[in-house]
Image: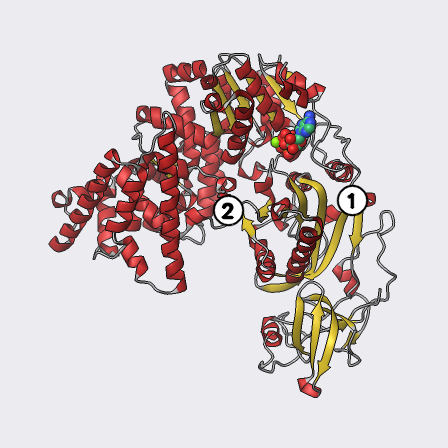
Amino acid sequence: MSSYIDQLNDAQKQAVLATEGPMMVIAGAGSGKTRVLTYRIAHLMEKGVDSFQILSLTFTNKAAREMKERIASIVGESEAKNLWMGTFHSVFARILRIEGDKLGYPSNFTIYDSEDSLKVISSLIKENNLDKDIYKPKSVQGRISSYKNNLITPKAYQNRPDLQENDATARMPMIGQLYTAYTERCFRAGAMDFDDLLLKTNELLHRFPDVLAKYQERFKYILVDEYQDTNHSQYLIVKALASRFENVCVVGDDAQSIYAFRGANIRNILNFQKDYPDAKIFKLEQNYRSTQNIVEAANSIIAKNRDQLEKNVWTSNDKGEQIVVHKAVSDSDEGNWVASNIFESHQNNHEPWSSFCILYRTNSQSRAFEDAFRKRNIPYRIYGGLSFYQRKEIKDLMAYFRLAINNSDEEAFRRVINYPARGIGQTTMDRLINVANSQEKSIWDIAENIYLYPTGINKPTQQRILDFVERIKSYGVLAQKHDAFDVAAHIAKTSGLIKAMSEDKTPEGVTRTENIQELLNGIKDFSEEQKQIEDGDATLAYYLQDIALLTDADKDNPEDMNKVNLMTIHLAKGLEFPYVYIVGMEENLFPSMMSMNTRSDLEEERRLFYVALTRAEKRAYLTYAHVRYRWGKLIDCEPSRFIEEIDERFLDIRVPEFGGFYSPPDEVKAAFDSPQSRTVSRGNDSFGGKPRFMKKQQEQKPIVPPKKHQKLKTVSEMNDSGEASNVPDDLEKGTRVIHDRFGLGTVKEITGSGADRKAIIFFDNAGEKRLLLKFAKLQKARKS
Ligand SMILES: Nc1ncnc2c1ncn2[C@@H]1O[C@H](COP(=O)(O)OP(=O)(O)OP(=O)(O)O)[C@@H](O)[C@H]1O
Ligand SMILES: [Mg+2]
């Protein structure tokens, strides 16, 4: 037997070797589920299964790529290339390109991303004169998405009084009409949104038995990773495709189900056993990823959930260090502490930057860390958030590409018809849209035959529209004959986009031009790469498809490799890092405010914490802040209940006692950041005008982990004692002080007197600062 099989434990081996029939692996984090899938595919190929007949569905395309590389290293590159591997969306988009005409879609249909789809919805809300404060585009989008993922078409919705009533109760009785209009609008534009890629695949397999038979025959072996996070639509696709051979292998972990809010259905695991009563079920219990401390701490967390399948996860790895719990003064102090900590680890242990990962609950938390990293020149990369492909200039150029490939693409049309400006204004656009709606045609159809329709648009403007149409058509012709790069470069130049941008000499303008250049570089790479592949496709059309389905975790580029990683916990699924910092461990943030009302929401939040903690290989850190800016206000924070839920023997609690303190409002902060500041009267803070006083620092013993079941002290408890006090006058060289933004520091020098009294302070995590004492709400730190 091949040597790679020896890199598996017995349970894993069995799961890899049992190639025939349905099987499921439900096992804890880091127990090798993904490894089993990978090796199983290699094994199938070694047994002689044709690589074209294996379909493997992963959570990100990046995961698919990594699996492919691993498989290639076992069975050879040329065979591994033919595997059908990727996310549900990318695999079924590929199939819809081939079969979509049966459903009335062009093979070059556009994939609308979430922003495109939101624009269509906003425009429909406006066209129907609905109140956008009630019909919030995002909520409407969410509802439509959830209907689609449950296979409720606009027509099916008509027969669902329960859903209609729900929407009416939410004061949105027009949802049904919006859904219908949205569907028609996308269809006319030859566009599918992300949910359509699944919905339409289901429709295809359901309505065309010959198509179903063809793909059942093709995919003799089907494998699904992260099965716990599949939604109903995905479940049905797998079920339909697998029903002929029943060689279907799914792996997952119910304790890591974190997408219920987006329609993932944990019942898919139970359904699997119902659908295939003979399915083999494998358990993997040994964790290879993390230290004992981390594994056991994670177990102690997840044990608090009522609804879960029983698992016994253990590891023979080293015991490892305890999980550090750090309390920061404020959100910016939290950023500074983490950055310093990483910097030290990097220096002292020669750890590459990429060994570190910061996990947060919401994207907006990244800012404090970005600031702290920039100050220290620590390279970092953020997953998610505004990605390269979401930048305006990139979307503008891509819209030209999209329109050239699919003339009906309405969102693309709207984006570029008058950019760069060519004298076709909003009124003209509104007229085009009106006529398109009344004729039930795409805007393009109207524009192309503008003389035939009573649009009320004047002759010169009509001519300008026709010129635009001709130009786009000529791009389309080029795209048939030349490779993606040649066409893209031609479009960038002749559309006037580069010219318009290069006229803008501001730094932002320069960056935008550079971004366009960068995009063209990427297309060049793509074209060259495709030309080297045997059955490669270097067309612009294929490039667009490739790009449209990148998920956030996919947008890697090689120079991003050695950087500290920042991402939301949701994006971290399946990944692993030696050092993990889970930040913002505070009530109302994590668990989030929205999640505290029902047990099931709170349990999902706890699973999210379990996912976060189990990403760590060597060390985990939990941090929280004493005060934090949220929604533009400074608020007091309480440590997250999840910290208390971890058995304390796994924790190394470092909670400095800074006591309560006066938290200055923004304008005061601005003042003490620049010494030539305005005078701001004391005590008028942003808390309803009531002064908040510094509380006397509590006399506490040196920091020790709390006794068993002793609770971490909350901020309100800390504030409940002590009297008001002022900036201490006995500051001198060497005094340890605490500042709400910069954290702990040591006074280096005091100068001036009275209102001009200043201090130079070296902060442990924030470096040297000069502060005007009148404004810098300093406190003396407890001696330790
Ligand atoms: N038998 C083994 N021997 C050595 N290392 C292993 C073994 N099985 C898995 N690993 C390693 O353990 C780590 C975790 O494995 P893997 O990512 O497959 O786990 P998983 O169950 O998919 O985790 P998650 O639930 O987080 O997705 C990986 O680095 C993997 O290479
Ligand atoms: Mg995995």
Q: Quadrant of residue 19?
A: top right
Q: Position of residue 105 (x, y in %)?
A: 31, 30
Give the position of the N terminus as an image quadrant. Answer: top right
Q: Nearer the viewer, mark 2 or mark 1?
A: 2
Q: Which residue is mark 1?
A: 321
Could you say which is closer to the camera, residue 89 or residue 55?
Answer: 55
Asked if disc 2 and disc 1 are in contact, CB closer than 8 Å, the reply is no
Looking at the picture, which amino acid does disc 2 mark? Glu
Q: Position of residue 732 (x, y in %)?
A: 78, 78
Picture quarter with ligand 2: top right
Instruction: Please say if 174 is above or below 51.
Output: below
Is any part of residue 199 visible from this angle? Answer: no
Looking at the picture, which amino acid does disc 1 mark? Glu
Tell me if the residue at label 1 has its CB under 8 Å from ligand 1.
Answer: no
Relative placement, left or right, of 203 versus 245 is left
Q: Quadrant of residue 247?
A: top right
Q: Which of the numbered marks, if any, corresponds to residue 559?
A: 2
Q: Position of residue 738 (x, y in %)?
A: 74, 69
Instruction: Please say if 220 is above or below 504.
Output: above
Q: CA distance from mark 2 to mark 1?
A: 32 Å
Q: Which residue is depicted at the point 53% across and 16% down?
A: 45
Instruction: Please say if 711 is above or below 618.
Output: below
Could you say which is closer to the camera, residue 5 or residue 214?
Answer: 5
Tell me if the residue at label 2 has its CB under 8 Å from ligand 1.
Answer: no
Q: Which residue is depicted at the point 79% across and 57% down?
A: 713
Give the position of the C terminus as an image quadrant. Answer: bottom right
Q: How is the image coloured?
A: secondary structure
